Amino acid sequence: MNIIKVLQYVFLGIIQGFTEPIPISSSGHLLIFKKLFNFEMLSDINFEIIVNFGSFLAILFLYRKEIIKIITDFFGYIKTKKETYKENYKYAWLIVIGTIPAGIFGIILKDKIDAISDNVKLVGIALLITACALFLIKDMKGKKEKNEITYFDALIVGLFQVIALFPGISRSGSTVVGAMTRDFNRQTAVNYSFMLYLPISVATMILGVKDLISTPNITKLILPYTLGLIASFIVTYFSAKWFINVMKKGKLGYFSLYCLIVGILVILFL
């Protein structure tokens, strides 16, 4: 494989890394850039799974201390029933409940979603929908802290995450919108959004392992896949930290405007 093709993989890894944490749709932007630069040789789903895993590792690393605390407190509460462990015990179940809807509908709708995953016009429309949703919640502040989230809140946010199964709908955008409509404060909303991303990403990777292993000439793809994963990991880490800071400042309006402009351009010219 020549250096140009390897760099194409790295470039798309960077695109994945930058767009995954922020509310503008990573899958939609991967498709846009593939069409824009005619990267048809990168149309296989395996590469997207690989770079998505890079994003997963970055979010896992970013939230590593909190995740370890949630896990230890979860089992600590089961073992001792101490009140000090109860908040994270409940939070773990909130993550599970928030993940279930996307898991169920992801399995049910997989074939239909795959059939439209290469339709760039639908991505453009989806970006316009994202723009409208972000505009509606851009000034919301919310009050609920982590310990005030209810199981019903988690279910509602989980249903919003189902919408992101469709190409061009941002996962982080849909979950943040769902959380803000349930009166989460901005920090709680973005943190819960990233927590919901982790199990979904693991499930995607597990489901894709079989196809990945059976890929013809997989040995030739080890280098570009690895470089794409590394690029995705590094860029996701910094992009996520940036988005957390943006959420604190309540600057979602910029993402709304961006999605509006890109959505219109995609519909008109791609």
Image: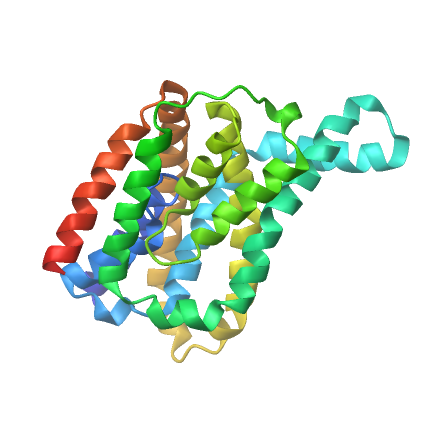
* Image height of 61 relative to 227, above or below: above
Is the N terminus in the top left, top right, bottom left or bottom right quadrant?
bottom left
The residue at the point 64 percent across, 38 percent down is 152
Position in image of residue 177 (x %, y %): 43, 36
In-front residue for pair 185/206: 185
Q: Nearer the viewer, residue 78 or 50?
A: 78
- Say which residue appears at 18% left-offset and 46% top-offset: 262
Q: Is residue 135 left or right of residue 185?
A: left
Q: How many marks?
A: 0
Task: Note whether residue 242 is visible.
Answer: yes
- Specify whether 23 is left or right of 194: left
Q: Is residue 95 left or right of residue 11?
A: right
Determine the image quadrant of residue 145. Answer: top right
- Give percent across and percent down for residue 84: 79, 22
Residue 74 image offset from top left, x and y in percent = 76, 36
Residue at left 42%, top 41%?
Answer: 172
Farthest residue toward the right?
Answer: 80
Kindly identify the residue that appears in the image at 52 percent across and 62 percent down. Answer: 106
Residue 57: x %, y % from top left: 50, 45
Relative to residue 90, is residue 186 depicted above or below?
A: above
Is residue 222 among the parts visible in the rendering?
no
Q: Nearer the viewer, residue 208 or 132?
A: 132
Q: Considering the image in quadrants, where does the C terminus appear?
A: bottom left
Above or below for 20 versus 1: above
Above or below, comparing residue 257 to residue 33 in the picture: above
Question: Does 53 sit left or right of 29 as displayed?
Answer: right
